[in-house]
Amino acid sequence: MTLVTKTFEGLARAAAKGQGMPDLRLVVLPHPLDSLPEPEIRQIARRHADEIIQNLTSAPRLRTPAAS
C-alpha cells in the first residue's frame, strides 16, 4: 500500500506495474500537501484513515496467472 498525491498517481501506477505489482493499492491524496497548514493535513489524514487501515489490514489482491 502506498500513499500518493493525485499528481503522481499515474507515475505510481506505472512504477508499480513495472516492478511486477500491478495491483498495488494506492491511497490518493490531494496535491500539493507541502504548502498546506498542519491542521488541514491532519484533516486530510483523518478523511483517509479508514481507507489506509483497510489497505494495511486486508489480504492483498492477487491476480491469478492466465491459463496458457
Image: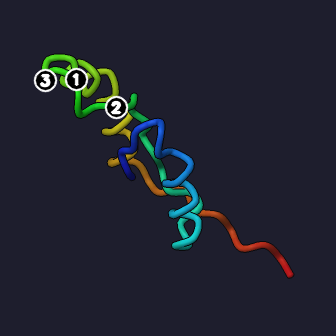
Do callouts 3 and 1 mark residues in contact (Cβ within 8 Å)? Answer: yes
**In this figure, which residue is indicated by the disc labeled 1?**
36
Q: What is the three-letter code of the residue carrying label 2?
A: Pro
Task: Name the residue at 39% across, 52% down.
Answer: 1
Camera-nearest label, 2 or 3: 2
Task: Name the residue at 86% across, 82% down.
Answer: 68
Q: What is the three-letter code of the residue carrying label 3?
A: Glu
Looking at the picture, how far across and down is residue 54, in whole percent?
A: 37, 39
Looking at the picture, how far across and down is residue 58, in whole percent?
A: 40, 48
* Distance from the alpha carbon under mark 2 to that under mark 1: 8 Å
Looking at the picture, how far across and down is residue 32, in whole percent?
A: 34, 31
**In this figure, which residue is indicated by the disc labeled 2?**
32
At label 3, counting other C-alpha atoms closer than 10 Å, the crowd grade (few under 14, some 14-19, many 20 or more) is few
Looking at the picture, how far across and down is residue 14, in whole percent?
A: 58, 59
What element does badge 1 sit on?
loop
Q: What is the three-letter code of the residue carrying label 1?
A: Leu
What element does badge 2 sit on?
loop
**In this figure, which residue is indicated by the disc labeled 3?**
38
At label 1, counting other C-alpha atoms closer than 10 Å, the crowd grade (few under 14, some 14-19, many 20 or more) is few
